[in-house]
């Protein structure tokens, strides 16, 4: 596919594909489990189209800062952001360079974003920087499948899948990434994707503390 076509697809098709896919029931179930645990000043890295907004507990959230590099996705999120029962500020930026002060966040939320962020380790370093010492990282991610056969298929499909799904990598290990960045896993939950989404591999949600 020519570069112009790829650019058009990335701007005009991929955001809607990702929004529709991440609205599926398997994703919604995980959001319901952990997103209500967010509290205080919340920074959501990979805010996307705002699919987490309905699951925040308005009684616990002071305000939310949503960060995403994709202007189309933020446009999709705008109506939900305006209707939220707490203040929502949307910022267009990548996770590797958050335009936020040190120690601003009580909670950082990342859902289905470590698979697409070009440099997840840099993003995790930034997340540590903006979290308060007592802050928590809430995450929901997919990653490497458990069985070697499925992992081999993930490797084979990885490049094609990434071009279709907004740069998503099938073969990353989110728990290893989070632990390797110095976070301490306090709680991890596991789920299963339905058969049509087998290529997404393992499904994890959890809470982590820095240090």
Image (spheres, helix red, strand yellow):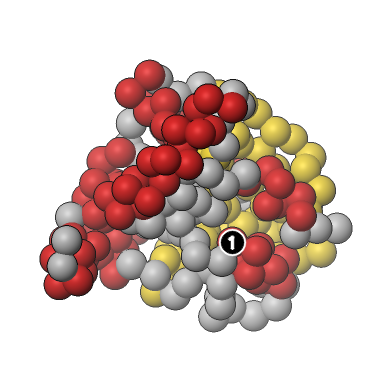
Left or right of 156? Residue 129 is right
Residue with the most extreme top position:
195
Is 92 in front, or is 59?
92
Is 81 in front, or is 124?
124
Picture residue at 40% right of the left edge, 20% below the top: 194
Q: Quadrant of residue 43?
A: bottom right
Percent from the top left, x then y, of residue 91? 42, 73
Q: Is residue 198 above or below residue 174?
A: above
Percent from the top left, x then y, of residue 123? 60, 66
Percent from the top left, x then y, of residue 14? 24, 54
Left or right of 206? Residue 95 is left
Percent from the top left, x then y, of residue 201? 50, 31
Left or right of 96? Residue 54 is left
Q: Quadrant of residue 173?
A: top right
Q: Tell me the quadrant of the picture where the N terminus can be found.
A: bottom left
Picture residue at 56% right of the left edge, 66% below the top: 119
Picture residue at 39% right of the left edge, 74% below the top: 92
Q: In this rendering, does residue 157 appear at all?
A: yes
Q: Quadrant of residue 33?
A: top right
Residue tagged 1: 120
Is 9 in front, or is 93?
9
């Amino acid at each position: 596919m020519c570069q112009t076509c790829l650019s058009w697809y990335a701007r005009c098709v991929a955001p809607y594909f990702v929004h529709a896919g991440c609205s599926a029931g398997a994703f919604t179930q995980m959001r319901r489990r952990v997103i209500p645990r967010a509290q205080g000043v919340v920074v959501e890295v990979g805010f996307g189209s705002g699919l987490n907004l309905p699951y925040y507990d308005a009684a616990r959230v002071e305000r939310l800062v949503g960060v995403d590099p994709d202007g189309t996705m933020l446009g999709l999120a705008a109506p939900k952001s305006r209707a939220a029962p707490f203040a929502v500020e949307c910022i267009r930026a990548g996770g590797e360079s958050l335009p936020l002060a040190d120690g601003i966040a009580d909670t950082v939320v990342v859902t289905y974003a470590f698979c697409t962020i070009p440099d997840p380790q840099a993003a995790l370093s930034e997340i540590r920087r903006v979290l308060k010492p007592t802050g928590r990282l809430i995450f929901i991610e997919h990653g490497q499948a458990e069985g070697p056969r499925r992992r081999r298929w993930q490797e084979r499909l990885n490049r094609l899948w990434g071009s279709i799904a907004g740069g998503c990598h099938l073969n990353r290990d989110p728990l290893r990434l989070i632990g390797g960045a110095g976070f301490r896993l306090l709680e991890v939950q596991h789920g299963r994707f339905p058969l049509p989404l087998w290529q997404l591999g393992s499904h994890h949600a959890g809470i982590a503390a820095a240090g």
